[in-house]
Structures are given as C-alpha cells and as structure tokens.
Image: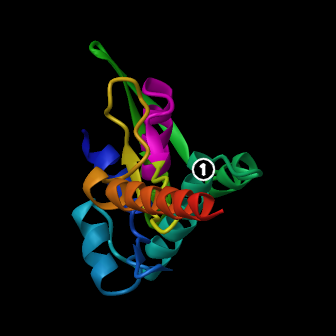
C-alpha cells in the first residue's frame, strides 16, 4: 500500500470507538504528530480540514446521501496540474497548505475506489467506527478485525440464537 493509501486509512480510522463512544484523534497535540508523519504541518486549520474530509469520506463509504455535494465543496479550490515528461504525465496537487493532506486523502480514496471497487469498507460491528480494506478473495469481509469485531458479533449472534431456542423450547 502506498503512502497516500496509508494516509487514507489513518484519516478514516482517526475517530475510533472506545467503550462504545467515538473518540477524536485529530485534535491539537497527538494529531500534530499524525499530520507531520504524512507531510503536513499539524496546524489547527489542517486538522479541521482533515476532520471535515474524514466525515465526508466515511459517509461516502457508508453510502450516505448528499456526499457528492459535500465532497465537491471540500475540493472546490483544489487542482491537479499536469507535468509532462518523456516518461509520461505526473500530476501535481495544488492546494492551500492546510487543505493539502485532506485533498491527498480524497485522491487516495478516489484512486482506491476506482481500482478496487467495494474493497474499502466500514466495519459491520455497529459498536466499531473503523474502516478496512477487504482483502478476502471473494470480497465478503465484514469486520475490521475477525479476532475483535468478528468474534464479538458471532458470539452475540450465537447467544441470541441460544436464548431464542431456549424460549421456544420452554413453550
């Protein structure tokens, strides 16, 4: 996976659920290190743009309504400038510095969605807020982690079936 795909997953997963509550990792302090790791500055404006882009991309992946308009708005003053050479065309991202990381995350999402449609998913565990790349051969993965979310949901489903079965047997 490339650096921008790593950025995309890091942005998408920067608001994990802990103890059933969504937490925020893109705030001053630790998020500054996050931004710098991916070539950003960690400024408050940059973190704000990352939070806005995260929400829109999460909504896009989940299939929410109205995301195209919101994405268009966030990318309205972003452009790619061609830089031709004998080897081909390289595209240079032009964006105000506070918007650059958010734009890179959006571009990574777009490339990934085009090259591997349906493989970037939200975890099916409603208590989880993480996203993952489904690398299963048939593309049927449902959980960010089988050992964490998958086993929990399977255990809940089994317990529910057992309760239903006992209740049915009692009648």
Magenta stretch prevailing secondary structure: helix
- Kindly identify the residue that appears in the image at 50 percent across and 28 percent down: 117
- Residue plotted at (33% across, 77% down): 31
Task: State the residue in front, 99 or 110.
Answer: 110
Q: Quadrant of the C terminus?
A: bottom right
Does 135 sit above or below residue 49?
A: above
Query: Could you say where residue 32 lies in the image, as x and y percent from the top left?
Result: 31, 78
* Residue that protrudes farthest toward the bottom in the picture: 29
**Residue 112, image x and y in percent?**
43, 34
Figure colour scheme: rainbow
Does residue 94 appear anywhere in the picture? no
Question: How far from the left and from the top, in percent, is residue 48?
Answer: 52, 75
Locate the N terminus and report the quarter of the image it occupies. top left
Camera-nearest residue between 170 and 57:
170
Q: Residue at x 34, y 75 (%)?
A: 42
Classify mark 1: residues with Cα within 10 Å, few (<14), some (14-19) or many (20+): some
List x then y, in percent, for residue 51. 51, 70
Q: Is residue 3 visible in this depiction of the protein? A: yes
* Residue 123 or residue 158, whichever sits in front: 158
Residue 77 in the magenta stretch? The answer is no
Pick the front one: 37 or 66: 66
Callout 1 secondary element = helix
168 left or right of 73 in image = left
Q: Which residue, given by chain and number where applicable, does mark 1 sit on?
A: 62
Quarter of the image where one finds residue 147: bottom left
| In the rendered image, the vertical position of residue 3 relative to residue 37, given as above or below | above
What are the residue bounds of the magenta stretch? Answer: 105-121
Left or right, 151 with respect to 57, comes to left
| Residue shown at 31% from the left, 34% from the top | 135
């Amino acid at each position: 996976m490339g650096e921008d795909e790593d950025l995309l997953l890091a942005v998408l997963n920067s608001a994990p659920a802990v103890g059933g509550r969504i937490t925020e990792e893109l705030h001053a302090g630790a998020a500054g290190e996050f931004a710098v790791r991916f070539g950003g500055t960690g400024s408050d404006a940059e973190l704000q743009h990352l939070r806005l882009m995260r929400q829109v991309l999460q909504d896009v992946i989940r299939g929410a309504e109205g995301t195209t308009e919101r994405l268009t708005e966030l990318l309205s003053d972003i452009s790619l400038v061609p830089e031709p050479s004998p080897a081909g065309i390289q595209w240079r991202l032009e964006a105000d510095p506070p918007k650059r990381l958010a734009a890179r995350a959006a571009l990574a999402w777009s490339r990934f969605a085009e090259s591997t449609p349906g493989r970037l998913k939200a975890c099916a565990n409603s208590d989880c807020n993480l996203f993952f790349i489904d690398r299963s051969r048939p593309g049927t993965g449902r959980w960010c982690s089988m050992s964490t979310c998958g086993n929990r949901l399977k255990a809940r489903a089994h317990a529910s079936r057992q309760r239903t079965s006992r209740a049915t047997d009692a009648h």
